Every structure is written in C-alpha cells, then in structure tokens.
Amino acid sequence: MTPATKRGFSPRALIGENRPTLWIAPLLTVVTLFYLYPAFEVLRYSITNASLLEPNYEYTLDTFTQVLSDPVLYKVLRTTAIFVVASIVLQLLLGLVIALAVNRATRRRLPGMVFMRSLVLSAWVMPGVVIGVVWAIVLNDADYGLANLLLGAVGLGSVPWLSTPSTALMSVVIANVWRGTAFSMILLYAGLQSVPEELYEAAEVDGARTLQSFWYITLPQLRPILMINIILITISTLNTFDMILPLTGGGPGQATEVLALRTYNVIFQNYSLAGGSVLAVVMLGIAMALTLIYQRLLRSGGSL
Amino acid sequence: MKPWVVRAAGLAVVVVVAYGCGGGGGLLTLDRIGKEDAPNTMTLQLNNSYTHQSSTPSWADGFERLFTQFAEDHPDWKLELKIVPDEQATQAQARLLEQARAGRAPDCANVDSFVIAQFIDQDALQPLDQYFDQEEIDGFFPFVKDVVVGDDGKLYAYWWATDLRLLYRRTDLVPEAPRTWDELIQAAKEAEQKDPKVDGYLFNGGRWEGTVFDNLAHFWSQGGELVDEQGKPIFNEGQNREYMLNTMEFLKEAVDSGASPKRVATISDYSEFESAAQAQTVAMFQGGDFQYPTLEETLPPEEFKKYEVSPIPAMREGQEATGTGGWTMGAFSDDPEKVEMCAEFTKDVFVGEGNEVTGQLPTNPELFDTLDKFQDPIYDTFREGLKAGEARPGVPVYPEISNQLQIAIGTVLTGEATPEEALDNAAEASMAAYEQQSN
C-alpha cells in the first residue's frame, strides 16, 4: 500500500496516534462549555422577552424592535464610538512611543529596562474597578482633587474633569488609555524585537535617516502586530464598563454611558434579561464586523 | 537551628492559621456558627459588614461576641454562613430573588428593606408574627410597618437597622437652620461670602442611587408619590409632575445661583462630604445620620463642635420628609423549625444588640430609650427625623425609575436638558420598563 492510498473511515482513525482529536478534545470541551454555550444562550435570550423577575418567557422579536428603536441606543452608540476610537488612537500612539523608547534603550543596554517594563505593565494588571476608583480620586473636580491640586500648584485653574459631559468623556478616555497603553506597548515591543537588525544596517548603508527607517522599515514590519493590537484594543474597549462604573457611573446624565455599561444597567436596573441580551448581540455584531474589516485590511496589504 | 525544627515550626504555624481561618471545630469559623457536629443545620446569608469578618474592627468584634453567644445558647444548631461582599450587597438581592423563585434561597438572609415588597409579592418570605410580640410590631416607625407588614397583616421580615438623611451645617457660617429651599440657597450664598473657600451646599447629584434617594425627600415633602397601588410609575402625572418639576428646578437653581458648585453632578459617594468637611470647604451638605460618628472621629474637636444637624429643608415651611433605608432579616425556609431559628437569630443578634454594635438606628422608637449607644442627645434628633421617614417603593420598576431620575437630575444639573425635557424622558423610559415588566 502506498502512502497516497485512501483508507476507509474508521473511528479508531479519529483517536489513533498522530491524530489531533484527543489533543483538541479538552480545548473543544472548554470552548463549548464556557464560550459557545453562553454565547448561544445570549443569542437565545435576545429573541425572548425574558426578565429576571419572571421564570416564564416567550420567544419574540419584539425585544429587538424595542431596543433598536430606542433613541437612547444611538446616543450610547455615539458615546461608545468616540470612546473606542479615541482609545485606539491614543493607546497605539503612546504604546508605540514607549515601545520604541524601551527598545532603543534595551539595544543600548541601558540599565533599569526590566523595571521600566514592569512599571508600565503594572497599570495593565490592575482590576478595572480599582483603576476607576483611583482615577475618580485623581480627577475629583474639587480643588483638593489630585489633578486640580497639581494644576493649582503651577498657577493654573481647576478643570471640571467629571462634571461636564465633554470633559467627563475625555476623562474616561484618559483612564482607559492609561490602563491599555501598557498592553499595547508590550505587543509592539515584541514586534520591534522581531524586526531584523540587518534591515536597519542596510538602510544605514544606503544613507536613510531615522525617520525614513521608521517609516519604510519599522512601520511596515509592525503592520501585523498593529492590526492585532487594534483588534484587541477594540474588543477590550467595547467591553469596558468595570472602570467606568466607579469613575462616573455613566454620568453626568448619560454622557459616559457606553454600550457595555448600558447592557449592565438594562439587566440589573431594568431586570430585562432579553433587553440586555439584545445589546450584547449588538456588541458582538460590532466587534465581529470591525474584526473582519481589520482582517481584510491586513490581508489586502492596505496601508494603515 | 536544625532544618527539621524550622520545618516543624512552619507546619505548626500553617496548622494554627488554617484552624483559625475556618478549618477548626470551634463554635465560630469563617463559614459556620455553631458546632460542626450539631444535629440541625440552617443556611444563613449575611452581608459581610454584619459578620465577624466585617472590615470595621469594632463591628467584627461585636458580631464575633454575638455569634459565639448564639452558638453557646443553641448547641443543637449549626448555621452555615454565606457571606456577601458589601460592594455586591445590592446585586445579591436580584440573585436572592431569583434563588427564592427557584426554591434555592438560603433558609434565612439579610434582605434590603427596599426590595422586601418584591419578595412578599413573590410569596418568597415566611411570616414571622408568631415569634415576635404584637406590641413590638406595632411599635415600629410607620414607614417600617408599611414595608414589612403585608396586606394580610402578617410580618414578613424584621427590619432591624435604618438610617435617614439630614442637613449638616457649620454653625459659624450658617447659624440658623434653613427650613425652606429659598432659605437654604440664601444661607449657602451668605456662607460663601463669609468664607470664599467654602461651597455653600453640597448634595449627591452623580449617577448613583444616593442621588435619587436623597433628593426624593424634596418630592415626598410636597406630598409626591412615585408609583400607584399597582406599582405603575405616576411621578409625571397630575400634581406629582408639578412636585417633581419643583424638585428639579430647586436643584438647578442651587447650581445656577452658585449656592452649589457644578461638581455636585459628579458626587456619588457620601465620603465626598466628609472630605470637604475635613478640608473645611463646605458650609452645608445633605448627608446621612451614619456620617455623624465618622465626622466626630475625623474632625478636630473644635471643628466638629461647629456642626449641627437639622431636617432637610422643604419647599414650604412645615413640610418634612427624609429618605430611609436599612436592612431586614427574612426567612425563606419551608421548615417551621428553621423559620423559628431565623427569628431567634434575628432577636438575639440583630434587634438591639446589632444596633449597639453598628450604631445603625433602631426601627422602634422605644429602643432609643433603652439602648446605651443611643443616649447621646443627637439621637433624639435622629429619632424625631425618622418620624418623617419615607421608604422607597419596593416595586420591581423602582430601580429603573431611580436610574432614569439619576439621568434626569444629571442632565438638568449640567444644563443638557430643561427640567421638563428631563422629566418627560425619565417618565417615558420608566413607563416602557414598567410595561415590559408587566407583560
């Protein structure tokens, strides 16, 4: 029998040596139980009128209609869009700047780089609730708020960080960027480490300046990492509500109520399991659509 | 020292620590009250604050003493503890309701006073009348009786601790207690003139429950009602609409006139008032009775002496109301013996004794006379204030009404919406939630 000969199906073939089934089974079980099943339940609840107050429910599309026709949803989507786009841009830019600095310092063997990386990462490992509480103290509008205290010390006036709708959204973005930049930096730093040194040496021989090296070597080499970074930042920012809850609670009014926070409110204030599930499905749809767009950009080799 | 000695000593420390942390067979462990081998078991869900693991050392010590005493007095029982972290206490109520509906609730539990009506509606709670004297039940403050006594006249939970909201003021800046909104705004502005460092009047205006709960006093004092008998939101109907608009216009006026700073729209924690008091940057604030001991502890004595409390000013003189909250104990078990044990536990640990440990106000005016903790004259003011107490309506739509009114107050304070627009939006969203829940 030649290796190319086809064999008939045999159950043993599924679990035999060098077959992936056994290796994949634990992963498949975990993914099914903890990811696919809950996601399926959310989809199922979204086409019901389920409530936390009533054990019985019916299948209906009315909840979808109600949630999608609520004008508040579009205000929340707008807030979410500003929050996500500002977070992506700032986290990428700051992450890239810090990663370049750390990479340069590491190549020059400057001391303290491990400490520096650990310090930056400490922001990322903090729970969102803690970050929200810390920033609420820092950005307290009172004169004794930490940020206003510092501004006062240098002769500048107090800023209403959280009490006007526009500054409140800006403050929430600042807190989120502070948390997410570390993650961005680590990914980009790993990407920078993998850029072959020879490319820079060749560019140097050709007389390229630093900016030209960055533009024609570093950025193109980092493109896959940048794309992955954008996808991950988008998903994590879309899901953020734990940090906003203690920082502004979504206020003043609804100025900082993002989609994830609204989902939480609809379930726990309104007891509407179905309404919350519809919003979760909307979030899932947005995240998937953006991911597909990013992937297409990545594959097509389109410019950033 | 030889290595085996070090290892043995280490092992001994681990054993001692593990024993102390709940692995032992004593009367009180991390998750049990009573002996491990006691023949009868009751499951008990408590907020962390009301246990021997409270983060307040004096509360932890007090409940440790009470739990141990209870275990000694009831040797045939062990109570299996489920402790709810304080920050999850509100969400835990939604879960408890779900568990009760599915018949999986603990036998006995701390229940938030403002959700009791929902539990009674769901037939989740067992009557406790036979375990308490009728005189004791009749002695409750009226707002307490309204909540814990069902339509059938039976007692469905024992509300043992309550609180109220009042106006705190620095008498050096505001010598006379303002009685009306106009007087409050005037006094705040005068205080700011006397000391430009201070904010005249601070109140909760951020996106959280306290904003609605505290400011509902202004609505209630005019005679306003949030919901009707069926639990339907009516705060935007007839006279109620006028009362609610008056309330929002007063809050807006407080900010627009400069009596209150714009940042009240961000205040979502009572500790903000304490911080301002410590920084000596506030003349008046609307706070809770529970802040009085904290201020006494944290302010220098000469600064604390400047503070006095008085009823919350109303639209017109003579109108008075204040929001009241607090915790109850309820029995969920079908087993009469466990219901009786739940009542026993409530009596022995919480009623009176629990008030002494925590300083949280009793729900029966007579206890103010008998308990040592409440002999300070300030508690006379609190007791009087409770007579005008109002509890939030325990209807399923209340959390959404609160959520919508928080948004409404926020948008009015920041100038994003007029009081009329904000109120109409809040009413529309609350009605939508009510109709959804009713279907």
Image (tube, rainbow, N blue to C red):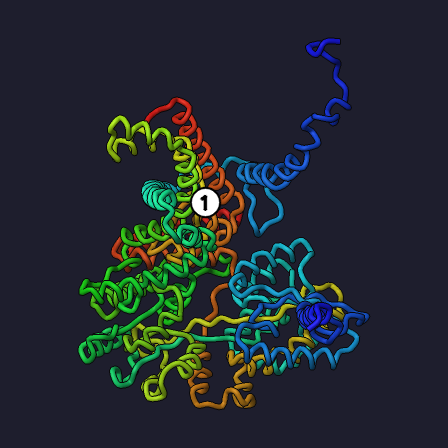
User: In the displayed structure, would residue A6 be above or below residue B205?
Assistant: above
Residue placed most toward the observer, A224 or B52: A224
Residue A30 visible from this viewpoint: yes
Q: How crowded is mark 1: few (under 14 residues within 10 Å), some or many (20 or more)?
A: some
Q: Residue A95 appears at what percent x and percent y?
A: 36, 44
Asked whether A124 or A138 is in front, the reply is: A124
Q: Mark 1 points at which residue?
A: A239
Residue type highlighted by circle 1: Asn
Q: From the viewer's perspective, is residue B301 above or below residue A255?
A: below
Is B113 or B358 nearer to us in this picture? B358
Q: Where is residue B68 in the image (x, y as percent from the top left)?
A: 69, 79
- Disc 1 element: loop
Q: Which quadrant holds the C terminus of chain A?
A: top left
Q: Classify A35 as above or below B293.
A: above
Q: Residue at x 35, y 64 (%)?
A: B267
Q: Which chain carries label 1?
A: A
The image shows residue B350 at horizontal and vertical percentages of 61, 78
- Name the image quarter holding residue B108: bottom right
Q: How many marks?
A: 1
**Residue A72 visible to an observer of this rendering:** no
- What residue is drawn where x is 38% and y is 64%? B268
Q: Where does residue B110 sit, x and y in percent of width and height?
A: 60, 68
Quadrant including the N terminus of chain A:
top right
Lateral position of residue A205 relative to residue B61, left or right: left
Residue B407, quarter of the rendered image: bottom left
Task: Using residue B287 as the reference point, say whether residue B152 is left or right of it.
Answer: right
